[in-house]
Image (tube, grey):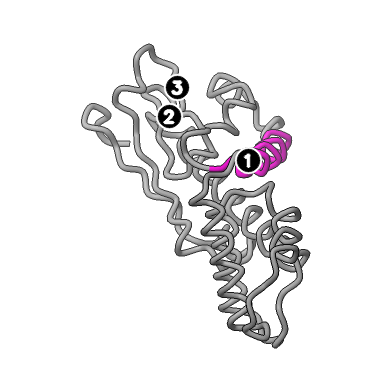
Amino acid sequence: MQRTDTDLARFAKALAVLNAIFGNGKPMSKQVVEAYYLVLRGYDTEAIEAAVGRLLRTRTRHEMPTPAEILEAVEGRVKDRAVLAWAAVERALKSSAVYQGVRFSDPAIHSAIDMLGGWQVLCSATTYDMPRLRADFIRMYEIASRRNGHDEHPDVVQGLLEGTPDDPVDIDLGYDRMASERPSQIERKRPPTIVPSKHSGNL
């Protein structure tokens, strides 16, 4: 994963915040920062920052979190997001988004759907197929989430009608509200908001 100087600065700042709260407050050596980076470099900066936020809200031990502990927090959040993302995909499949195209607020969903074969595969699936597709989507989503930045994902998911990405349906998943919750809690939350495009009519 290619990181910019800004990404590296944000990574170092996130570690510094953890060190200030849980560590001894002394500056971390370059070698220690590099060790944390080697463990966490597979995940995008936003996921790491969100995991740091979760640790700040929930952690009670008074020592610097280990790289493995931060990694666990990152991966836990990705799994939470994957559950919510699949719920959004299922809702979109029942709307005009399938035909017009869709732009999810989390573009990693676009990549995951592409890796599954696009809307065509999902739309032709039977009820029997859905548990397998759900598992495949979650796995693809976790892979896609490791890409750093929106520019590495498609802007929209191509609809079944020609030219539909020009006027896609927008779906906001509201991850900020869910960042600290478990997957079982997320599944009980209200469905993601679908904002119809100007030509879609009522969903």
Mark 2 lies on a secondary structure that is loop
**Callout 3–callout 1 Cβ contact below 8 Å:** no
Residues in magenta? 131-148
Task: Report the side of 31 relative to 184 (left or right).
Answer: right
Quadrant placement of the N terminus: top right
Q: Residues within 10 Å of mark 3 (few under 14, many from 20)?
A: many
* As drawn, 124 above or below 150: above
**Callout 2–callout 3 Cβ contact below 8 Å:** yes
Give the distance between the C-alpha atoms of the residues marked 2 and 1, in whole angstroms: 15 Å
Report how many numbered discs are placed on residues in the image.
3
- Marking on residue 141: 1
Image location (x, y in percent) of residue 203: 33, 36
Task: Give yes or no for residue 132 being in the magenta stretch.
Answer: yes
Task: Report the side of 100 relative to 136 (left or right).
Answer: left
In the current view of this chain or complex, which residue is farthest to the top? 162
- Residue type at mark 2 is Val
- Residue type at mark 1 is Tyr
Image location (x, y in percent) of residue 104: 43, 40
* As drawn, 93 above or below 117: below
Mark 1 lies on a secondary structure that is helix
* Residue nearer the viewer, 36 or 172: 36
When asked about the image quadrant of residue 18, the answer is bottom right
Task: Give yes or no for residue 50 being in the magenta stretch.
Answer: no
Q: Give the residue number, with chain letter if any, for mark 3.
A: 158
In the current view of this chain or complex, which residue is farthest to the left? 198
Per the picture, the main secondary structure of the magenta-coloured stretch is helix
- Marking on residue 156: 2
- Marking on residue 34: none
When asked about the image quadrant of residue 49, the answer is bottom right
